[in-house]
Amino acid sequence: MGRFLAIDYGKKRSGIAVTDVLNLISNPLTTVETTQLFDFIAEYVSKEDVERIIIGKPLQTNGEYSENMKRVEPFYNRLKKLYPSIIIEYFDERYTSVLAHKAILDSGIKKKDRQNKALVDKISASIILEGYMEHLRFTNEHK
């Protein structure tokens, strides 16, 4: 059983989260400059057994694609070609930034540290991954 890796893809930087080896817990891992994302993924999958890559699907509140979809879709398509043995899926990322900001605020982190956008990105990736894992548990329980 391989880990799940989630990506909150951004124009400048992308948040990364991963599961533990049993795929029970989502952990914020890091934030990577988006221009370096393919290199990061290549290095990570060479060291870790990755079963799935989950990419946040950029949707607006009305369900329409957001502007970021024009950047995410080519990234998604290239990943599918580069890693045919890894399951690569989208998962709705609506409200993850809001939830990440709330989690950071609730954690008691100092105001200066709360303004760290990289922290928001990797926590957003972790929230995407948590939602995806919950979705898998729910659909598997109801089959």
Image (cartoon, rainbow, N blue to C red):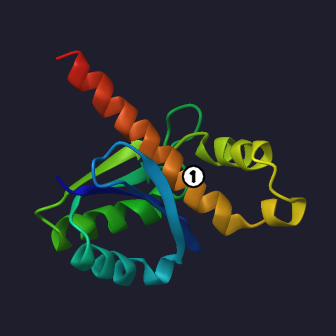
Q: Quadrant of the C terminus?
A: top left
Q: Is residue 76 above or below residue 104?
A: below
Q: Quadrant of residue 36?
A: bottom left
Q: Is residue 23 left or right of residue 56?
A: left
Q: Is residue 56 above or below residue 10?
A: above
Identify the secondary structure beneath mark 1.
helix
| Residue under the image location 23 percent in, 15 percent down | 142
Q: Position of residue 12 (x, y in %)?
A: 59, 74
**Closest to the observer: 65 or 85?**
85
Q: Which residue is mark 1?
A: 124
Q: Is residue 106 left or right of residue 94?
A: right
| Residue under the image location 57 percent in, 52 percent down | 124
Q: Does any portion of residue 52 appear in the rendered image?
A: no
Q: Position of residue 111 (x, y in %)?
A: 88, 59
Q: Is residue 58 above or below residue 95?
A: below
Q: Quadrant of residue 60?
A: top right
| Residue under the image location 31 percent in, 46 percent down | 23
| Residue under the image location 36 percent in, 60 percent down | 73
Q: Amino acid at mark 1?
A: Ser
Q: Quadrant of residue 71?
A: bottom left
